Image (cartoon, rainbow, N blue to C red):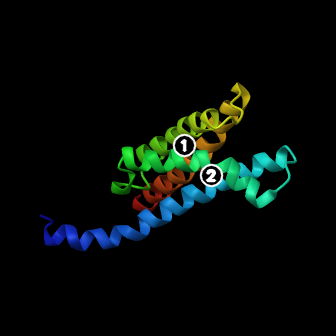
Amino acid sequence: MISSTQQQSAPGRTPAIAAAGLADAILILVFAAIGRDAHQRPDVIIGVFLTAWPFLAGAALAWLVARAWRRPLSLPAGVAIWLGAVAGGMILRALTGQSVVLAFVIVALLSLGLFLVGYRALLVLVRRLRKS
């Protein structure tokens, strides 16, 4: 049974959960768009979604496995989502016949790490600076 305190706090967390999930999805789409642009791939909009979907699916699975909704803007959640996006993305790319080369894995690790952990690290830093 959920206590009244838990019921009151849950709606207050909903915007943070939604914002973190949306930010993660947008940043994964940005990663895919930058990559497609760097390689001058056609079909910009559809192509971005075709490139991004494995990473989006990996990130979604990581959200569930890590229970990231509990602390969606924390660094541990960001690390779990980052690694899940990359691992899941690469596995799904391989299973669907898309290329998975070492250079791409490294670029994905670095880029998605910067994006998915980076904004959370900035938020942690801002919170700490405000407290001091």
Quarter of the N terminus within the rendering: bottom left
Whole-percent x, y for residue 68 in the image: 39, 51
Whole-percent x, y for residue 118 in the image: 57, 48
**Left or right of 129 on screen, residue 102:** right
Please tell me in which quadrant of the rendered image residue 44 appears: bottom right
The residue lying furthest to the front in this view is: 96
Whole-percent x, y for residue 6 in the image: 20, 67
The residue lying furthest to the top in this view is: 102
Foreground of the two, 76 or 122: 76
Q: Which residue is mark 1?
A: 85
Residue at 75% over, 53% down: 47
Residue at 60% over, 45% down: 54
**Which label belongs to residue 28?**
2
Specify few, some or many for label 2: CA neighbours under 10 Å numbering under 14, 14-19, or 20 or more.
Answer: many
Tell me which label, 2 or 1, sits earlier in the chain.
Answer: 2
Residue at 50% over, 52% down: 120
Foreground of the two, 101 or 109: 101
**Left or right of 103 on screen, residue 28:** left
**Left or right of 101 on screen, residue 91:** left
Q: Secondary structure at mark 1?
A: helix
Q: Amino acid at mark 1?
A: Ala
Quarter of the C terminus within the rendering: bottom left
**Eyeballing the image, is 87 above or below 32?**
above
Q: How many numbered marks appear?
A: 2
Please tell me in which quadrant of the rendered image residue 70 appears: bottom left
Q: Amino acid at mark 2?
A: Ile
Whole-percent x, y for residue 102 in the image: 69, 25
Q: Secondary structure at mark 2?
A: helix
Q: Contact, CB < 8 Å: mark 2 with mark 1?
A: yes
Specify few, some or many for label 1: CA neighbours under 10 Å numbering under 14, 14-19, or 20 or more.
Answer: many
